[in-house]
Image (cartoon, rainbow, N blue to C red):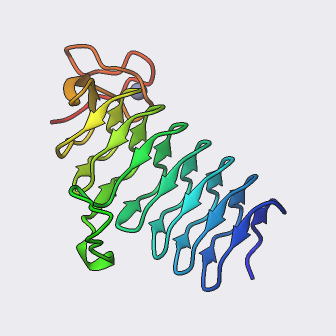
Amino acid sequence: MSAYFVHESSYIDEDVIIGEGTKVWHFSHIQSGAVIGKNCSFGQNVNISNNVRIGNGVKVQNNVSIYEGVELEDYVFCGPSMVFTNDTTPRAKYPKGNAGYRKTILREGATVGANATIVCGHTIGKWAMIAAGAVVTKDIPDHALVAGVPARQIGWVCECGEVLPDNLICPVCGKKLER
Ligand SMILES: [Zn+2]
């Protein structure tokens, strides 16, 4: 039994693994088979579906559902009320079941802004940044800044989160983005 925190208003199903230092706040539900790393934070009204894998140091803001087929690597940030999907052509009458879900992967350090939507079947690169309200419909390169509907690249972002100037040297931390 590792030392993690779950608010009494939340439900953790059977066969869930949660790492040390992780916090699950109010009115959340973590479903069976989920594997969650250390030092994560899940805000209010978060649902983590069956068999979802989440790395260490991940932050999920309020009102986010992480469906089966989605994987979050270390230090991913999910902004409030952002949306994942796991089926591009859902029909109520013809459910596909979990074998039909399309995989979505968020690589280390990726950020998804408030109210953005990630259409399933895509990979968001390391330290990429998805602007608030964007709709992602394709793979996103490492360190890309994307915005709009559908999301298009408008720049590059440093690991620290600063938007980079043309020379790709971060004015805040001094790191140069090598591409
Ligand atoms: Zn920087």
Residue toward you, 77 or 9? 9
Q: Quadrant of residue 138?
A: top left
Residue 101 x, y percent position in the rendering: 28, 69
Left or right, 134 with reference to 82? left
Tell me the quadrant of ligand 1: top left
Q: Which is more toward the observer, 55 or 104?
A: 104
- Name the residue at 24% across, 27% down: 149
Front one among 164 and 6 = 6
**As displayed, is residue 53 above or below residue 148?**
below
**Quadrant of the image for the C terminus?**
top left
In the rendered image, the residue lying farthest to the right is 8
Spot occupied by residue 64 in the image (x, y as percentages of width and height): 53, 48
- Name which residue lies at 54% across and 52% down: 58
Residue shown at 49%/50% (left/top)?
75
Which quarter of the rendering shows the N terminus? Answer: bottom right
Res 178 quadrant in image: top left
Point out residue 48 in the picture as x, y percentages from the top left corner.
54, 63
Q: In this view, does 61 lie above or below 89?
A: above
Q: Which residue sits furthest bottom?
A: 15
For residue 83, which quarter of the picture? top left
Whether residue 126 is situated above or below residue 15 in the rendered picture: above
Tell me where residue 28 appears, x and y as whole percent: 67, 58
Q: In this view, does 5 lie to the left or right of 151?
A: right
